Amino acid sequence: MRKFFAATFVFIVISFSILYSLTPKYRTKQPIKLAISSPVYSFDPAKVIDKNSLFVISQSLESLYQYNYLKRPLELEPALADGMPEVSADGLVYKIKIKPEVQYHSLGILKNKIRFVEADDFIWQIKRLAFLATKSSGRWIFSGRLRGFDEFSARVNYSQELFLQEQISGLKKIDKYTFELHLTGAEPNFIHYLAMSYTSPVPFELIVAHQNKLDDHLIGTGAYQFDEFRDNNYYFKKFTNYRYEKYPQITQVEGAQIKLGNKQKLLPLIDDLTIKVINSDDFMWKSFELGDLDILEVPQGQLYKLADPNSRWYRKLVSNNVIIKHFSKRSLSWLAFNMQDSLIGKNKILRQAIAHAIDFNKYLKLMTGNTNLRANSMYNPTLKEYKPQHVLPYLYDIKKARELVKKSGIKPQKLKFNFSTRGVSQKKMDEAVFFQKQLAKIGIELSIKQNNFFDFFTQLAEGEVQMWSDYWSYDYPDAQNIIQLLVNNESLSINKSSYSNPKVDQLYQKLVKTHSGAMRKKLAHQIEDEVEHDFPWVLLMYDSTYLLHHKEIKNFKRSSYIRNYVKYLDNSVQRN
């Protein structure tokens, strides 16, 4: 009998062993680790404008619409909205339904509560953009467009009491899950504005509890719920009550339908997310090499390592099965002038001299290892308004630059200006020193003021900034998005150069009301001609970068407009 049981036990063990070997191996999901170069300066969706802060809040906050993760060209789809908006025949009324029973993260004032998104939450957020005390960088998307928006701002001013009491006439609540936006004129890009984080819903309870000061509060409906900030890391956890959303099934690539990754699985696919603050380019690269980062957008200071496929760094990455992707950004970099400055802002010939004094080839080599392209237009090559044959009215010519300095009429002892950085990284200092040396060749003494992002804007508001390197990453794929940076009635957070040209303002107002693609192109080109005549900017480069990720990361498809891409990623690994 004992022999029988022993034989039976051995048979069972062997059977289970065979069965185990034939079944799929267990799959485990590891936390995904990413990096940004500077801390978040605010969680408030009404204020955030820098790319690092936008990336962080986009994991927790959602808007009415988002860009389809896989489709190219880009296509908007509903996020919190329940379908695309109903737009009136004249383009003046947008009726929007939102998804019912979309739950907020159970944090802060909403802890241990079930709170669903309602139409009122969008109305309150738009009111916050209009409320001057919020100091929103996003009021531009409704100013002059939404009926009653500017009147509300003037009427309420800085009064918290009036903010709570007064209404914007162009905002109409239809029912608990439906509201309308009434515009002053048809706006071709209006739906793109509704995909921006500025329009993320904010519960009334949160506004009241914190007296409209939301810089330290990140409560949204997104796939990831903010857990804590510790040791220079932002920790997020999967939001277990995230709305029903599946991974998209197909994408269009060069005319062929292909399937990518986790077809129709519920999002998010990864449970935990850590976003590290690493302000050293070298340390960021090393962290990726050691496996402490899963995806790396190669910092500017490290781009030279990948410019040559035969470099030792490139070969090492390939040998370690790292996926290397060259990614073109929808962005522009330029040298900016404060047009309100009594000296540099009022002397066009001096600005022309500076434009001719910059060795653009050396600049590209220093900053990007020649991986970026020299800009030849204020419009990025990815835009339909871009003209490849366009030629800028300046090039590197020291002799001409010196002649222009003399022609400017400014005495040599007054040729002293400051250059303000918008960050504290070594690369920012390298850039500042480069401009300092370039301008020294034409008799201009440039002092460097090193600032973090917040300090830069403080000094800008106080009129202490004269020259700086500026950058814009497009919010939506249209030239209008960058032209707005040069419109006179925009705030300092948008029109940082304080540039003013009545003809540009007039052309811009025509542009925003024009639906014809051909006419919009014509207006954009007329605006470009006017701007180039005034020299408020010296165009530098179109950005591109290399994106690296370890082979375990699946579904990674990058776009400048899609910041909430983490929810689509998968890093499941097999184990025995």
Image (cartoon, rainbow, N blue to C red):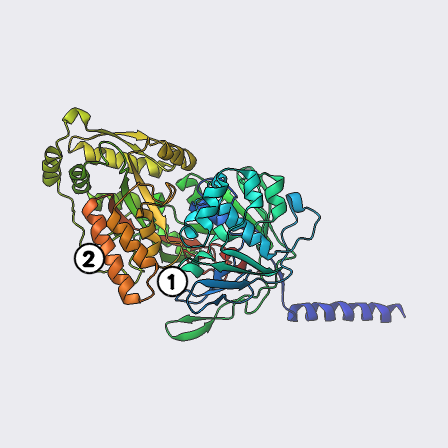
Q: Nearer the viewer, residue 344 or 274?
A: 344
Q: Nearer the viewer, residue 377 or 159?
A: 159
Which residue sits at x=36%, y=36%? 426
Pointer 2 residue: 390
Which image quadrant for residue 559?
Answer: bottom left
Please tell me how crowded label 1 is: few (under 14), some (14-19), or many (20+) other residues with Cα within 10 Å: some
Name the amino acid, label 2: His
Can residue 420 be spotted in the picture? yes
Pointer 1 residue: 188
Residue 363 picture location, percent across and down: 24, 43
Q: Which mark is residue 14?
A: none
Q: Nearer the viewer, residue 58 or 176?
A: 176
Residue 195 picture location, percent across and down: 47, 57
Residue 451 picture location, percent across and down: 38, 33
417 left or right, relative to 559 = left
Q: Secondary structure at mark 2?
A: loop
Q: Quadrant of the C terminus?
A: bottom right
477 left or right, relative to 341 = right
Please tell me how crowded label 2 is: few (under 14), some (14-19), or many (20+) other residues with Cα within 10 Å: few
Name the amino acid, label 1: Pro
Q: Quadrant of the N terminus?
A: bottom right
In the rendered image, the vertical position of residue 481 relative to residue 22, given as above or below: above
- The residue sitting at the right extreme is 1
